[in-house]
Image (spheres, rainbow, N blue to C red):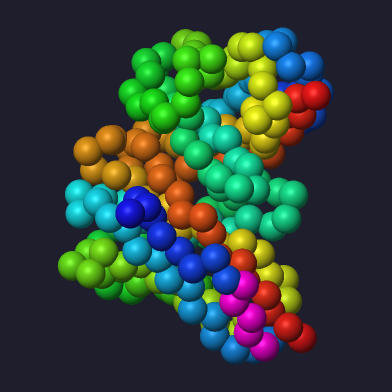
C-alpha cells in the first residue's frame, strides 16, 4: 500500500515568488492536513481538508492557501514568499474520523 | 498556556531501561491522543494511539491516558539506541474536529 507522497522533496525559491506543493494521500484517505515544521516553532497546523472542503485552518496569513481535489489529492500554495517561510512542509492523511494521521516525507522549502 | 505541553528534554536513559515520556493538554474536549516518533531529518511516524482512559500496550510501548488529569504518557520498555529520537505528543481537539495539535516534542537519548 503506497504511503503519502509529497512532491517536490526540495525547493529553493527567491523571496517574493510563489510556490505550490503537492500531496497524494494514502488510497481511501479523504482527510488531508498540512503542517509547517521549523526548529523554533515545531509542528504548526496550516489547514485540513476533507472531501474537497476546508474544515480547519491554523493561524497563518492569507498567503498560505490550499485546496483538495475530487481524488483527495491536495495542493498548498504560498504566495509572496518571505525568508521566514523556509521550513519543512508536511502533509498527512487519514480516513477522516478521529484516527491518527500518516505523514509524507515532506517538502523542504528554502527561501533565499 | 500551550495546548499540548511536553518537556523538551533531552531525556537520557541507559540501554535496557524504561523511558517515560509525559504530555499534558489543555482542552478537556480532546478526544484522541497520539504519540509520534520523529528521527532527525525524517517525518513523524505514528507509534501509538489511545482514545479512552487507562493503558494501551503495543510491544515495548505502553500509552497511558488520564482524562481527569489531562495527562498522556508513553513508556518505552527495554529502551534501545534505535529509540533515540524526538517523541511528539498530539491531540485532536474536540471542538475543532480533525485539527491535530502537536506538542513541541521530547528528545530521547538511549545510551549504550
Where in the figure is residue A1, as x and y percent of width and height?
62, 38
Q: Is residue B50 left or right of residue B78?
A: left
**Residues drawn in magenta:** B10-14
Residue B11 colored in magenta in the image: yes
Q: Is residue B98 left or right of residue B40?
A: left
Name above or below for residue B88 compared with residue B94: below
Front residue of B59/B61: it is B61
Q: Quadrant of the C terminus of chain A?
A: top right
Quarter occupied by residue B83: bottom right
Where in the figure is residue A45, as x and y percent of width and height?
47, 36
Q: Is residue A20 visible?
A: no
Front residue of A5/B59: it is A5
Q: Residue at (48%, 73%) from the top-left corner?
A: B21
Please tell me how many numbered marks the rendered image carries.
Answer: 0
Residue B26 colored in magenta in the image: no
Q: Main secondary structure of the magenta part?
A: strand
Q: Is residue A3 left or right of residue B103?
A: right
Q: Residue at (47%, 15%) from the top-left corner?
A: A62
Q: Is residue A88 visible?
A: yes
Q: Residue at (32%, 58%) from the top-left corner?
A: B25
Quarter occupied by residue A20: top right
Name above or below for residue A82 compared with residue B18: above
Q: Residue at (51%, 55%) from the top-left corner?
A: B104
Q: Is residue B86 left or right of residue B63?
A: right
Front residue of A69/B73: it is B73
Where in the figure is residue A66, as x and y percent of width and height?
51, 16
Amino acid at each position: 500500500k503506497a504511503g503519502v507522497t509529497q512532491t517536490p522533496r526540495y525547493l529553493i525559491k527567491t523571496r517574493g515568488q510563489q510556490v505550490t506543493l503537492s500531496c497524494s494521500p494514502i488510497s481511501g484517505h479523504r482527510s488531508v492536513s498540512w503542517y509547517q515544521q521549523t526548529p523554533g516553532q515545531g509542528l504548526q497546523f496550516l489547514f485540513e481538508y476533507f472531501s474537497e472542503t476546508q474544515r480547519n485552518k491554523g493561524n497563518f496569513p492569507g498567503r498560505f492557501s490550499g485546496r483538495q481535489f475530487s481524488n483527495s489529492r491536495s495542493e498548498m500554495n504560498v504566495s509572496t514568499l518571505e525568508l521566514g517561510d523556509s521550513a519543512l512542509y508536511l502533509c498527512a492523511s487519514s480516513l477522516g474520523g478521529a484516527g491518527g494521521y500518516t505523514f509524507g516525507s515532506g517538502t523542504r522549502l528554502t527561501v533565499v | 498556556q500551550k495546548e499540548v505541553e511536553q518537556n523538551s528534554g533531552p531525556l537520557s536513559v541507559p540501554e535496557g531501561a524504561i523511558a517515560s515520556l509525559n504530555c499534558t493538554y489543555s482542552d478537556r474536549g480532546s478526544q484522541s491522543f497520539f504519540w509520534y516518533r520523529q528521527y532527525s531529518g525524517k517525518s513523524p511516524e505514528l507509534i501509538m494511539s489511545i482514545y479512552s482512559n487507562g493503558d494501551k500496550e503495543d510491544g515495548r510501548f505502553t500509552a497511558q491516558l488520564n482524562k481527569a488529569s489531562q495527562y498522556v504518557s508513553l513508556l518505552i520498555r527495554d529502551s534501545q539506541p534505535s529509540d533515540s529520537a524526538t517523541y511528539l505528543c498530539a491531540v485532536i481537539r474536540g471542538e475543532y474536529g480533525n485539527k491535530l495539535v502537536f506538542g513541541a516534542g521530547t528528545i530521547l537519548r538511549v545510551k549504550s
